[in-house]
Amino acid sequence: MITRTATSSHTEDSTILHQKEQCVHQKEQGIYPHVRAEASWQQQLSQLVSSVDELWRLLDLPQSLLESASAAARAFPLRVPQAFVDKIQKGKLDDPLLRQILPQGLELTPPPDFVTDPLAELHANPHRGLLHKYQSRVLIIAGSACAINCRYCFRRHFPYEDNQLSQAQFDELIQHLETHPEVNEVIFSGGDPLINSNARLQRWVDALLLLPQLKRIRFHTRTPVVVPARIDEGLLALFRSIAQSGRNAILVVHSNHPSELDHHFDTAMRKLRDAQVTLFNQAVLLRGVNDHVDAQAALSERLFDAGVLPYYLHLLDPVAGAHDFSIHDTEAFELYRQMAARLPGFLLPRLAREVPGAPAKQILAPNLSE
């Protein structure tokens, strides 16, 4: 049994809560009507656009779609940083960034093959807050919230309320991992793990680093794409602590389109590389967003310019509410052939599908010579 020393320090958690409450008060008073990318990450997360009426006003969207969008947002809330909204072209319904966050009435009538648990994750949930789908690695559900709610999210129906982790429950999770020496990699996901405070993340990481079998700690996150300021000194110190322990720190960002990325993202990625973090990107192939070769090639090139290696291009998981983003396999294969002709091999992400119950992701290899 590994001995752990409990910490009573909640200073950073309390500070962040105070900052969020203060920012909410300031917004109510009209002091910060819009928070831009230069603001602190706490300010940006406290003043997300969460009202359909506000989104419609900011982007001059058709009033005829407002009622159905409001109904969809009641089922799966709208949540988007102001800086992300600023990148969307006003009045353009087919803007690739708007498509990803726009609630639509058709979400409420999914076809029968689009389900609430498309990856059968509820059957791989042996402990509160833990998914154990693959032999050598596990995934920790580090919370339910994200910096942005993407309408294609495969966990939009996940029972987060049954997987919230207190510190005591996290300690029990560690004890579970002690009995599974085959697990040498832990992945923080969610929700988005970087919504947590640095103090909470550091406590969790410190506990994991006591596991002798652990080789890697990985974070899956979209937050550095939409709120790059989240990569602050406290978080960088956490990543440096992983490197100093002799383990590898990996951060997998999630960007689907080159228009999402800016110089703030570049700066954040440079800081992470300096902290010895390995950087990958995973994207989802989405109709009306990135289903053409120009967008895919530009995304790979833009990511590499920022020091991020394209990793996966996922086919859409058939989650209820996301069917409008679906692309047939034949279209995906043709697009991938075009990407292979355009990009060098190291910039070609692996085309992948996750199959419930399979021992690994299914890597799809269309005949690139056709």
Image (cartoon, grey):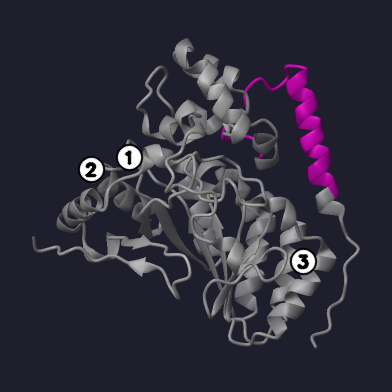
Q: Earlier in the sequence, mark 1 or mark 3?
A: 3
Locate residue 356, reporting x and y percent: 47, 65
Secondary element under disc 2, as helix, strand or loop, is helix
Numbered range of the magenta stretch = 14-40
The N terminus - image quarter? bottom right
Against 130, is 114 above or below? Answer: above
- For badge 1, the amino acid type reads Arg
Instruction: Please tell me the numbered disc located at residue 294.
Output: 2
Label 1, residues with CA under 10 Å away: few <14, some 14-19, many ≥20: some
Residue drawn 66% across and 38% down? 45
Q: Earlier in the sequence, mark 1 or mark 2?
A: 1
Against 238, is 327 above or below? Answer: above
- Compared across the picture, whether 108 is left or right of 204 comes to left
Residue drawn 73% across and 19% down? 31
For disc 1, the marked residue is: 287
Tag 1–tag 3 contact (CB < 8 Å): no
Label 3, residues with CA under 10 Å away: few <14, some 14-19, many ≥20: some
Secondary element under disc 1, as helix, strand or loop, is loop
Spatial CA distance of label 1 from label 3 is 40 Å
Label 2, residues with CA under 10 Å away: few <14, some 14-19, many ≥20: few
Q: Nearer the viewer, residue 133 or 47?
A: 133
Instruction: Please tell me the numbered disc located at residue 156.
Output: none
- Compared across the picture, whether 158 is left or right of 345 comes to right
Residue found at the very far right of the displayed protein = 8
Q: Is residue 244 magenta?
A: no
- For badge 3, the amino acid type reads Arg
Residue drawn 74% across and 76% down? 174
For disc 3, the marked residue is: 203
- For badge 2, the amino acid type reads Asp
The C terminus - image quarter? bottom left
